[in-house]
Image (cartoon, rainbow, N blue to C red):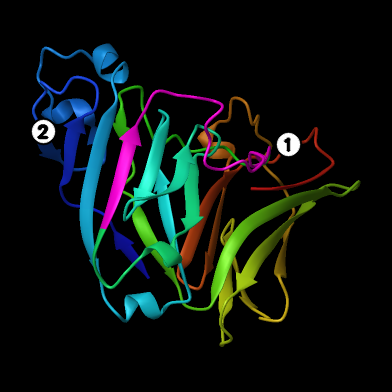
Amino acid sequence: MKKKLAGLWQLSPLSDLSIPQDDLSFPGALSQVLPDALSEQAITEQEWHLMHDFELSEAELQNPAVDLVIGGIDYYAEIRINGRAVLDCDGSETVYRREIRAHLQEGLNRIEVLFLEHDEDDYLMDDEPSLLCPLTVPTRLSESRMGIWQVPFLQFIPHVRLEHVAMEQIWHHGGGCEFKVDLHYQTFKAGLVSAMVKFDGMTYQLPIDVRAQRASALFQIEAPRYADPKNPDTKDLYKLNVELDGQLQQFDVALSESLCVTHVAV
């Protein structure tokens, strides 16, 4: 189950306090409610504060894990939940997912997004950046104007979190190939859970063993379409959809004749 953090967000300046506060909704640019005299370049040179309040019920908080999912941000931003810093959006990921269950409370909650001056020595997270899978073509969720181009949402996880998806293409010497999809997951609560994996018109329903951490699906491709990952043609791409315990991840996959076997996580 998801809860979109839609509706009005309050925008306040942090640099030039003479700029009036206003409310806006996303996806969109900050400039939609700022004075016309402010150019897009001038907006990016200042610091801004966004704030949005939302309600959570007791039933929603009974989920053992709650992830904040936010994307479509091209500028450095710090994310806070109920006054606590939980995430830096630093350009290392297209979509950010962070566990925030411990920072939430029943009733009124607040999320803040602070567009701040970038300081490479002051990161909240020191994790290594995620590897980009050369088999996938990233979907652009933002644009050059400062703003948020994908509505943030909370992902409630009843049993199992889909941690990441790994892909492997295995070419046959006689033609054709196999496409392997590995689902890496973390179990929070036992239950009857299955995953749905759809690729090129084929669908597998995989029972999830809550005692394990991975499940796999293998697809046979008799006449594969080749694509250039750096300059792909949409007609050459494959669609991969993975759904697990209410979580959905979608990928555009570009198979390459020059890659024999490639396995990376996304």
**Residue that badge 1 annotates:** 256
State how far apart marks 1 and 2 are (Cα): 50 Å
Amino acid type, residue under disc 1 in the picture: Ser
What residue do we see at 37% from left, 70% from top?
Answer: 1
Q: Main secondary structure of the magenta part?
A: loop
Inspect the magenta stretch and tell me whether residue 35 lies in it: no
Q: Compare residues 261 and 210 and report the one nearer the observer.
A: 210
Would residue 154 be visible to someone looking at this image?
yes
Disc 2 element: loop
Disc 1 element: loop
**Residue that badge 2 annotates:** 21
Would residue 72 be visible to someone looking at this image?
no
> Taking 154 as reference, is 7 above or below it?
above
- Where does residue 153 sit, x and y in percent of width and height? 34, 56
Quarter of the rendering containing residue 74? top left
Is 103 left or right of 148, judged from the image as shown? right
Inspect the magenta stretch and tell me whether residue 126 lies in it: yes
Is 246 left or right of 162, judged from the image as shown? left
Q: Compare residues 16 and 248 and report the one nearer the observer.
A: 16
What residue do we see at 17% from left, 51% from top?
Answer: 7
Labelled disc at residue 160: none
**Magenta residue span:** 110-134
What residue do we see at 91% from left, 46% from top?
Answer: 173
Q: Looking at the image, which residue sits at the far bottom? A: 191
- Where does residue 18 sit, x and y in percent of width and height? 10, 20
> Counting residues from the N terminus, which is met first, the one under dot 1 or under dot 2?
2
Q: Looking at the image, which residue sits at the far right? A: 173
- Where does residue 110 sit, x and y in percent of width and height? 26, 55
